[in-house]
Amino acid sequence: MARARQYADRVNIIKMVKVNGKWPFARIVERNGKIIRDHVWVDGRDEHHPEGRYYLEWYEDGKRRRKPVENYDLLLAAARAKSIELNAVKAGLIPPPEAPVAPVPTRLTMDAAIDQYLEYIRKHRSLRTYRTYRPVLNVLFRNSYTKIYVDEVTREDILKFTSDCFDKGLVPRTVYDRLVTVLQLFKRHGYKGLVEASDWPSYVETIRPIYEPEEIAAMLQYATLDEAILIKFCLCSGFRDREIRYVTWRDVDLRNSVVRVTAKPLWKFKPKNYEERAVPLPAAMIEQLKQLKARRNATPAELIFPNSKGKPNSLHIEVVKEIAYRAQLNCGQCVTKHGNRCTQGPYCQRFYLHKFRHTFATEHLRHGIDVRTLQGWMGHRDIQSTMVYLKGIQSKDALEKVNAGSLAAYVA
């Protein structure tokens, strides 16, 4: 057993241990001048604490110093060496050790901060997020921020960036999103509270558009068998575009009528917010998926909606637009940025995949699913993202009261 008498007057041995969820320093237990390993005094009691690490403790120029000792077998030697050193300093035999000089922190330039943050986003977020953040920071913000260093930022710099975005013709909602990106950059580097509540751009939170029953019926009528299953799956799962692209047969629990969103390392797919989730599917949808799996003789690892080569299909939106065009549902007014008119082909902007997700949320709320449950199904981190769908809900009770009211009598 280790002995402690030789240095107890100059250097103490203590141990950091876990007590009631905290990590205080405790005196070691000695018996007959020997250290009892992993035993410390806690509130006057001898307790066994194998966790934590040992420290040397001494006073130097009136200040308490501590130094960790990782290896218990070296504990005594380290304590004796420190005791000899302190005595030698006191006797004037050796000079006192010089205090370490803290390195002078270098100021971080704005260019370096942007590069570091974009590199972090590239490694830790999706490629889509990186491609969204990159032009905002590399182009918009670099051109707006005229100072050299990050620590020079003020509220006026952020307001100037907001004004510059409006000058470029961006709408308030887009400016809001760009501002979030910039503030996340500064938060990453330790700068918060740069704007006030009144500084955020105001925008109208629109009612999310949904597919009407007549539109869905028409699309299913003109869709092929596989296209129809894709449309039904989009409606019943509420999955995002990329989640549909990477869903495999292993994600579908045919026995319990559930489909899951899971990570796919093979294709570098990660669920949004890094949260996997499960969504219940109607029995009819499960039955059609069973038939599709049997028809393809598919293995669990295969994608449910792949391209012709069995790889993730990024053209599902084109499928939806093509079906709408065949069903003669195009509005006849859309013109794409490339000059394509929806009167002449599958270019109508009223038909897109995410609209199925809006329909999923709205219909479930309309039929009594509570907001918290829907939040989990949709994978929203913030419940406010789910509550926006409440704007488009008209309860049956409210409609009955409107029809029975005196105002309805005037238009009867």
Image (cartoon, helix red, strand yellow):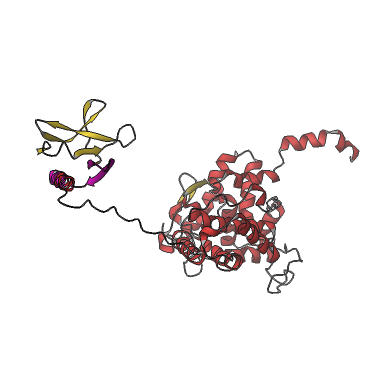
Magenta residues, start to end:
56-81
Name the residue: 61% across, 54% down: 155
User: Does the magenta-highlighted stretch encompass residue 76?
Assistant: yes
Query: 334 above or below 250?
Result: below
In the rendered image, is residue 220 in sight?
no
Query: 345 above or below 289?
Result: below
Please provide percent x and percent y for residue 347: 68, 68
> Left or right of 23: which side holds 39?
left
Name the residue: 44% across, 55% down: 263
Please provide percent x and percent y for residue 87: 15, 44
User: Does the magenta-highlighted stretch encompass residue 23?
Assistant: no
Q: Quadrant of residue 221?
A: bottom right
> Left or right of 337: which side holds 49?
left
Name the residue: 21% across, 47% down: 70
Q: Residue furthest top?
A: 44
Name the residue: 18% across, 48% down: 89
Name the image quarter holding the N terminus.
top left
Q: Quadrant of residue 100?
A: bottom left
Quick one: 110 or 367, which is closer to the camera? 110
